[in-house]
Image (cartoon, rainbow, N blue to C red):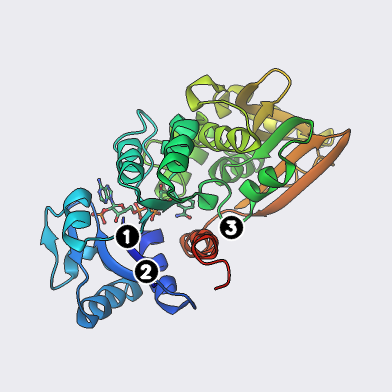
Amino acid sequence: MVPRVGLLGFGGVGRSLAQQLATISGAPRIVFALSSKGGVLVEGAGDLDALLELARSDKKLDGHPRFKQGLGLWEALEEAGDVDLVFVTLPPSYETGEPNLSIYRGLLDRGIGFITADKTGLARDYWGLREKARTRGAFMGYRATVAAGTPAIDLMRGLRGRPVERVRGVLNSTTNYILTMVEEGRSFQEAISRAVEEKLAEPDPRVDTHGLDAAAKITILACELGYRLDVTQVRRAPLEEVGEERVRDVIKQGYRVKYVAVFDASEKRASVRPVILPQTDPLARSSGVINVVDVEVENEHVTLTGPAGPAWRTARTMITDYLEYIGERNPRS
Ligand SMILES: NC(=O)c1ccc[n+]([C@@H]2O[C@H](COP(=O)([O-])OP(=O)(O)OC[C@H]3O[C@@H](n4cnc5c(N)ncnc54)[C@H](OP(=O)(O)O)[C@@H]3O)[C@@H](O)[C@H]2O)c1
């Protein structure tokens, strides 16, 4: 049976996802798409064509001829009937995890699975969601929540049960970008303003520079290894704490400053802070959108390097989750 799926969010990732879902083998049937102001119940081929046209031309959902103002998730699920899976591309919610967390819980309570790119719900209540998903037999896909484009979550899965000592990661591309500008002579204030102007940093740049984003990601990685951590337990020091002069001075001595998220498995503690690393350290070599995860296990290092984002790659990573979902429903497909 072809899975019936909804799209919750129709921004950069959601639009790319709609296009990619329409073309893959084993494509699902998209039965609704929602944005912050309302949405569309996709009932016929014309509705889908209009949705895909909006996605291709990078336009908002309210440009759809059958856009229903105020249509929300629970109503859309009711109206569409028999929805198997919802693709969630909502903005992150760092303060409280809401409304995202209630959405995940509500879906799982209804036995509906989700594939998400938002990290904030899982970072707040990974284990609660996992338990709900297990008891309801619902699927949870979240590869895109950490280093989307690089299978960091899969790396953790592959190391479960091994005596992992420490996980370190450069998991936030924006701070890489800011640090590069500071290395080149700009002040932190200038570099951060520039990152906001270029829309690389959130309008509130503290999401990146005070470690909220990286804290959510290291929490998910630790949980994926089997540890019980929630994001409020992660200690965070602001990026600027290291000082501009230091960022520049250490380069001459063969070091580099990076904003590093660490999970120490023996102490079950996590932190995000600026760290001075020898330039030979794989984390020191990350720059731009390149993320690095380094795991210390059995006195060796397992290291993964690769791109995070942009939107199309994040959507593609959600398709990887979807292929896993199809495989679970029908292993011979
Ligand atoms: N972009 C990337 O490369 C990347 C990489 C990894 C993870 N992510 C994560 O992926 C998620 C989506 O990113 P994005 O770049 O696609 O964000 P975006 O462009 O801001 O899109 C967010 C979408 O969610 C909709 N929305 C907001 N609140 C809603 C609500 N309460 N109910 C229904 N829809 C709502 C927005 O509606 P409107 O259209 O009305 O504004 C918009 O369509 C984020 O959590 C982000 O952190 C993104």
Decide which of 267, 91 is in the foreground and name it. 267
Answer whether labels 2 and 1 touch (C-beta < 8 Å). yes
* Residue 227 image position (x, y, % from top left): 62, 28
- Within-10-Å neighbours for mark 3: few <14, some 14–19, many 20+: many
**Mark 3 CB in 8 Å range of ligand 1?**
yes
In the picture, residue 176 is in which quadrant?
top right
Q: Is residue 215 left or right of residue 107?
A: right
Q: Please tell me how many numbered marks the rendered image carries.
A: 3
Instruction: Report the disc number at residue 227.
Output: none
Instruction: Report the disc number at residue 7.
Output: 1
The image shows residue 262, relative to residue 47, as above or below, that is above
Decide which of 3, 230 is in the foreground and name it. 3
Estimate the spatial distance between the alpha carbons at disc 2 and disc 3, rounded to whole Å.
17 Å
- Within-10-Å neighbours for mark 1: few <14, some 14–19, many 20+: many
Q: Check disc 3 and report the residue beneath it.
A: 149
Q: Which amino acid, mark 2?
A: Ala
Please tell me whether mark 3 or mark 1 is closer to you in this view.
1
Answer whether labels 2 and 3 touch (C-beta < 8 Å). no
Q: Residue furthest left?
A: 69
Q: Which amino acid, mark 1?
A: Leu
Of the 4 image quadrants, the one containing the C terminus is: bottom right
Please tell me whether mark 2 or mark 3 is closer to you in this view.
2
Decide which of 273, 17 is in the foreground and name it. 17
Residue 142 visible in the snapshot: yes
Q: Check disc 2 and report the residue beneath it.
A: 18
In the picture, residue 11 is in which quadrant?
bottom left
Of pointers 2 and 1, the one earlier in the residue sequence? 1
Q: Which amino acid, mark 3?
A: Gly
Q: Is residue 87 left or right of residue 333?
A: left
* Residue 68 image position (x, y, % from top left): 11, 61
